[in-house]
Image (cartoon, helix red, strand yellow):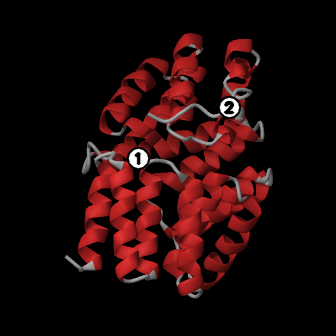
C-alpha cells in the first residue's frame, strides 16, 4: 500500500494503543511517501500521547519549516514548548498568535509561558483575557487560580478555584467522563481543602486517563498524604511529566522530604 494518509491514520491508532515503535514506523512510512506538515503535526500529536515532548517538538519544528505561517502548527508548537521547558520561545509564539488570532487557547498558552517564566501578574492578565474569550471554560479560570496560588495570594486563588469548580461541574453535567475536566475538578477540590472529594475525583480521572497521575500527586500533596504523593509523583515522572510541574508551593512540604527530593536528583526514570 502506498497511501500516506492510511499510514498516518495507522500511526495515530498505534499511538493510542501504546505501541510506540510500530507507531513511529507507520509515520516514517507516511513521510517517506509524502513529507507534509500535516503528517508531521500528526506525528507530533502521537508523540504527545506518550509525553515525549522533545520528539514532538522536533516533528513540529520540521512542520513549521514546511508551513511557517500555519497558525495550527504554531499553536501546537507553543503547547509543546511550554511542556518541554522552552518558555521564552513559547511566549514569543503565543504572543504572536494572541495578537493575530486572539483565541482563548492562545491567551492560555501565553499565560502558561509567562507563568513558568515567573511573571505571574502578566500570566494572570493573559488568563483573564482567555476567560473573557471563553466565559464557560474552566481552564483559564483555574489557571488564574494557580497563578494567584503560586504568588501567595491564597484568597484570590480560592475565589478563582471555586469559580473554576463551578464551571467544571456545569461542563461535566453534559460530558461526565471527559478526562481533562475530571482532572481539573480534582485539582480545584484539593486546592479548596475538600480532600476527601478530591481523592474520589482524582480516582475517576486516573481511571479515565492514566496520564492524570500528576494531578493525583498534587491531590495527595495538598491532602498531606506523603506516601501516596511519592508514589504518584514517581509514576508521573515515568510518564514524562516535566519536573517543573512539581516545583509549586503545593509540593513544598514534600520537596523538604529526602525521599521525595531524591526523585528529582536521579536520572529520568525509564519508560515502560
Q: Which residue is mark 1?
A: 180
* Residue 160 sits in quarter: top right
Residue 60, horizontal then vertical, whole percent: 55, 70
Give the SS element for disc 2: loop
Mark 1 surroundings within 10 Å by alpha-carbon count, few (fewer than 14), some (14 through 19), many (20 or more): some
Label 2 and label 1: CA atoms lie apart by: 29 Å
Would residue 49 be visible to someone looking at this image?
yes
The quadrant of the rendering that contains the C terminus is: top left
Q: Is residue 271 left or right of residue 100?
A: left
Residue 247, horizontal then vertical, whole percent: 71, 35
Mark 2 surroundings within 10 Å by alpha-carbon count, few (fewer than 14), some (14 through 19), many (20 or more): few
**Placement of 28 over or under 14, stated as above or below:** below
Residue 73, horizontal then vertical, whole percent: 52, 76
Q: What residue do we see at 47% from left, 52% from top? A: 138
Q: Earlier in the sequence, mark 2 or mark 1?
A: 1
Would residue 128 be visible to someone looking at this image?
no
Q: What residue do we see at 28% from left, 47% from top? A: 17
Residue 83, which numbered label?
none
Q: What residue do we see at 58% from left, 60% from top? A: 80
Q: Give the camera-side residue of 194 and 27.
A: 27
Q: Give the camera-side residue of 172 and 34.
A: 34
Q: Which residue is mark 2?
A: 267
* Residue 98 sits in quarter: bottom right
The quadrant of the rendering that contains the N terminus is: bottom left
Amino acid at each position: 500500500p502506498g497511501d500516506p494518509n492510511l499510514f498516518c491514520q495507522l500511526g495515530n491508532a498505534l499511538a493510542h494503543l501504546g505501541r510506540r515503535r510500530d507507531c513511529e514506523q507507520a509515520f516514517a512510512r507516511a513521510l517517506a511517501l509524502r513529507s507534509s506538515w500535516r503528517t508531521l503535526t500528526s506525528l507530533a500529536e502521537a508523540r504527545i500521547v506518550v509525553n515525549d515532548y522533545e520528539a514532538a517538538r522536533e516533528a513540529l519544528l520540521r512542520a513549521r519549516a514546511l508551513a511557517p505561517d500555519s497558525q495550527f502548527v504554531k499553536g501546537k508548537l507553543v503547547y509543546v514548548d511550554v511542556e518541554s521547558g522552552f518558555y521564552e520561545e513559547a511566549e514569543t509564539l503565543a504572543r504572536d498568535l494572541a495578537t493575530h488570532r486572539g483565541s482563548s487557547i492562545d491567551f492560555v498558552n501565553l499565560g502558561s509561558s509567562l507563568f513558568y517564566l515567573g511573571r505571574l501578574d502578566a500570566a494572570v492578565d493573559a488568563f483573564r483575557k482567555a476567560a473573557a474569550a471563553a466565559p464557560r471554560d474552566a481552564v483559564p479560570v483555574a489557571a488564574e487560580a494557580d497563578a494567584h496560588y503560586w504568588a501567595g495570594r491564597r484568597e484570590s486563588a480560592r475565589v478563582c478555584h471555586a469559580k473554576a469548580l463551578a464551571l467544571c461541574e456545569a461542563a461535566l453535567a453534559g460530558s461526565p467522563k471527559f478526562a481533562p475536566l475530571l482532572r481539573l475538578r480534582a485539582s480545584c477540590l484539593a486546592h479548596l481543602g475538600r480532600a476527601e472529594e478530591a481523592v474520589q475525583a482524582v480516582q475517576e480521572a486516573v481511571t479515565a486517563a492514566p496520564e492524570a497521575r500528576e494531578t493525583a500527586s498534587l491531590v495527595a500533596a495538598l491532602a498531606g498524604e506523603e506516601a501516596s504523593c511519592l508514589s504518584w509523583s514517581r509514576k508521573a515522572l515515568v510518564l514524562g511529566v516535566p519536573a517543573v510541574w512539581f516545583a509549586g508551593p503545593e509540593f513544598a512540604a514534600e520537596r523538604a522530604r529526602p525521599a521525595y527530593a531524591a526523585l528529582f536528583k536521579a536520572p529520568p526514570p525509564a519508560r515502560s
